[in-house]
Image (tube, grey):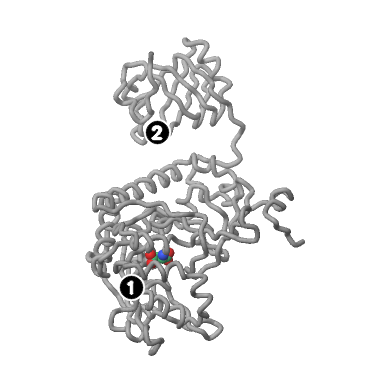
């Protein structure tokens, strides 16, 4: 019995009979000779159908692009004048002995032979399962997988454990609108989808886990922006008994390790990454995510920098104080007294650190308030009434009162990071089933209406 061989391995089978499975990339009919380029997940190969193998030759006449075939054939070295050094398998071809049509295909609604960037994006998203067949998208998904695997291995080797946290949860303030899910069993009540695992990861520190990470899906109901998606992925991490310096170093080493082992053609401009204070960044670059590349024409240049020393609070539109990054952050130690006394609010500096790459914020984190009084003071400065604080954050304040260790962490925006490493322009090029800027899944037609019965069960009426 012959076994299936992946097309990228055919070089090891010259002179032997093999089975290859895959899709018809193109077919060239020269009458006597019919050629097919067959494609599987690994590569492409030229198949030649000769009139001597009559049945296979006859079938090949009717075969069209994107049909799915199983071919039994002999791997032949090409004669010197037929070698094509531009093709992966340019030194060989398969002489088809028999062919089985596993499935036919209609003509595709989009061209998948190009990089796809010339095609209207809505069409690409509507037929995403075809769009993902193109070489560029296959590469993107594979490298995304490798990057995530590197992170997992790197952190596992350093004794971090990955812990899954709930998707059906309670509203947590990260500065965006929540997606909410009605509860059937508690009528009139709603879950919120997590904007991040922030509270759970801190609760895991209270639980004594000490070193947590998660490749976590997060949900934020934000207005259309080209680089935003309703759901996105974070590399989320939290550690106990740790300093800002240790967290910055750990993350910096992991970033360097990923780039150097997976994308060695990229050059990191400066190691260790420069650290810029918020004040310097605003004065020098007029932004808190400066693009410090020395040469912006170089697509292989990665200029990382840390931005530190952000103000903790800023004035919201209604005149009250709000947090600039994360309400769970601790102030720098020299400002702890101001926080607790709620004085000098405009000058309190937080332990927040952002990691910026080529002008994009790709991550951010902080040391957290592990004393309940300090966390409570943050909400009081923001003007939250006592009952709202205990209703929304009572569980956090209570947890912190049972011997919470000092802790801190970070989250990376994985989609943006992968986009930059791959030199793509949009995060939708690295998210397999991306939504449009308006948050629509054109392939599944979602969001969509639900049945009256479903609404009734939830005790929900929609307004016309
Ligand atoms: N949870 C924060 C965010 O999603 C990041 C962090 O501080 O860990 O923005």
Q: Is residue 273 left or right of residue 289?
A: left
Residue 175 appears in the picture as rendered: yes
Disc 2 within 8 angstroms of ligand 1 (CB): no
Q: Quadrant of residue 200?
A: bottom left
Residue closest to the eye, 85 or 135: 135
Question: Which quadrant of the figure contains the N terminus?
Answer: top left
Q: Is residue 125 above or below residue 386?
A: above
The structure residue drawn at horizontal position 33% and vertical position 34%, both measured from the top left corner, is: 85
Number of numbered discs present? 2
- Cα–Cα span, label 2 and label 1: 43 Å
| Residue 352 in sight from this viewpoint | no
Q: Nearer the viewer's eye, disc 2 or disc 1?
A: 1
Label 2 element class: loop
Q: Is residue 85 left or right of residue 224?
A: left
Give above or below for 354 relative to 126.
Answer: below
Residue 257 at x, y = what percent? 25, 54
The residue indicated by pointer 2 is 43
Can you say whether 145 is above or below 394 in the image?
above
**Quadrant field for ligand 1:** bottom left
Q: Residue at x 44, y 45 (%)?
A: 136
Write down the residue under mark 1.
307
For the residues labelled 2 and 1, say whether their Cβ atoms are less than 8 Å apart: no
Label 1 crowding class (10 Å Cα cut-off): few <14, some 14-19, many 20+?
A: many
Question: Which residue is drawn at the image coordinates 39% and 54% (left, top)?
Answer: 418
Q: Position of residue 220 (x, y in %)?
A: 52, 62
């Amino acid at each position: 019995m012959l076994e299936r061989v992946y097309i990228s391995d055919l070089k090891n089978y010259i002179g032997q009979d093999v089975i290859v499975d895959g899709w018809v990339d193109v077919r060239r009919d020269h009458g006597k000779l019919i050629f097919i380029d067959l494609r599987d997940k690994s590569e492409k190969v030229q198949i030649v159908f000769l009139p001597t193998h009559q049945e296979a030759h006859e079938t090949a006449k009717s075969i069209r692009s994107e049909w799915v075939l199983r071919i039994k054939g002999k791997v032949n070295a090409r004669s010197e004048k037929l070698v094509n050094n531009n093709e992966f398998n340019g030194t060989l071809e398969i002489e088809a002995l028999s062919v089985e049509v596993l499935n036919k295909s209609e003509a595709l609604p989009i061209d998948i032979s190009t990089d796809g960037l010339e095609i209207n994006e809505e069409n690409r998203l509507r037929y995403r399962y075809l769009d993902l067949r193109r070489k560029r998208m296959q590469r993107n998904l594979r490298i995304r997988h490798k990057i995530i695997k590197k992170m997992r291995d790197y952190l596992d080797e350093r004794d971090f454990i990955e812990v899954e946290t709930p998707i059906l949860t309670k509203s947590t303030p990260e500065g965006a609108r929540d997606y909410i899910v009605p509860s059937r069993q508690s009528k009139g009540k709603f879950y919120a989808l997590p904007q991040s695992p922030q509270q759970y990861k801190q609760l895991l520190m209270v639980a004594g886990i000490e070193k947590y990470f998660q490749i976590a899906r997060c949900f934020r109901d934000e207005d259309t922006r080209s680089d935003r998606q309703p759901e996105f992925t974070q590399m989320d991490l939290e550690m106990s008994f740790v300093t800002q310096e240790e967290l910055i170093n750990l993350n910096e080493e992991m970033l360097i390790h990923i780039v150097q082992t997976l994308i060695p053609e990229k050059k990191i401009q400066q190691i260790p990454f420069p650290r810029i204070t918020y004040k310097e960044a605003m004065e020098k670059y007029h932004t808190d995510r400066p693009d410090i590349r020395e040469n912006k024409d170089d697509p292989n240049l990665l200029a990382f920098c840390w931005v530190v020393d952000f103000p903790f609070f800023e004035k919201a539109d209604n005149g009250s104080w709000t947090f600039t990054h994360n309400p769970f952050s601790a102030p720098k130690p020299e400002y702890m007294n101001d926080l607790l006394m709620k004085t000098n609010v405009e000058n309190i500096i937080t332990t927040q650190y952002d990691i910026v790459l080529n002008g994009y914020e790709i991550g951010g984190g902080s040391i957290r308030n592990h004393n309940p009084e300090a966390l409570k003071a943050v909400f009081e400065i923001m003007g939250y009434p006592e009952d709202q604080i205990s209703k929304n954050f009572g569980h956090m304040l209570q947890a912190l009162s049972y011997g919470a260790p000092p802790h801190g962490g970070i989250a990376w925006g994985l989609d943006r990071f992968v986009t930059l490493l791959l030199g793509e322009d949009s995060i939708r090029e690295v998210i397999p089933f991306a939504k449009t800027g308006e948050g629509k899944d054109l392939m599944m037609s979602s969001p969509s209406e639900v049945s009256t019965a479903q609404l009734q069960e939830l005790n929900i009426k929609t307004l016309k």
